[in-house]
Amino acid sequence: MAMRSQVYEWANLGPSLTSPGSVRRQTGAVAVTVTQDIALDIFIGGVGNNITKPAETTATQFVVIEDIACSPQRGGAMQVRINTTDYFQNPDVTSQLGIPGLASPYPVGAPSDPATADNVIKSFNLYPDVYVLPGQTWSVLYTPRETVTGNATAVGGGAGTTGVACFVK
């Protein structure tokens, strides 16, 4: 059986504020608003760079998720969902947002807030790996605890611009 390694990077960057989603990263992209406490599917959520169909496995495939990380700003967290079940739950089996970016930052060393100069170091490792079995549909959800405000200024080009990103391997 053949094997390949893939990584996926999502960011809340779109061609414009009125057209928040795109299939690929574009030059001159602007940060798009991500609403607080609403889970956003980083693959097909319609914000930032997306793929064209939900992540799923065929009858002869399986996926191993080895690592997840997200921007530590705005209290962001990532959750792995397989079919309708969230992977990260509280001990009493109630739901939670997932792994916070402060525990698994992307990129490693990113500041905890855009206005500070601290560096957040990774303290969470996804062990054991998450297996997505043949025939299952899966997604990775990003949820910020504070609204991530978009801005018409290109990322890196002005105050108030907030770009957040997620990483899946």
Image (tube, rainbow, N blue to C red):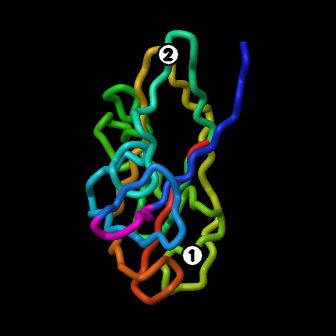
Q: Quadrant location of the C terminus?
A: top right
17 lies left or right of 120: left
Q: CA distance from mark 2 to mark 1?
A: 39 Å
In the rendered image, residue 126, in percent from the top left (x then y), is placed at 60, 41
Q: In this rendering, which labeled residue sits more in front, label 2 or label 1? A: 2
Q: Badge 2: how crowded within 10 Å, few (<14), some, or many (20+)?
A: few
Magenta stretch, main secondary structure, is loop
- Which span of residues is magenta-colored? 12-18
Q: Is residue 126 above or below residue 153?
A: above
Amino acid type for the residue under numbered disc 2 = Thr
The residue under the point 60% across, 80% down is: 118
Q: Is residue 14 magenta?
A: yes
Q: Is residue 59 magenta?
A: no
Which one is earlier in the sequence, the residue at label 2 or at label 1? 2
Q: Nearer the viewer, residue 89 or 77?
A: 77
The residue under the point 42% across, 48% down is: 42
SS class, disc 2 = loop
Residue at the disc numbered 1: 111
Residue at the disc numbered 2: 58
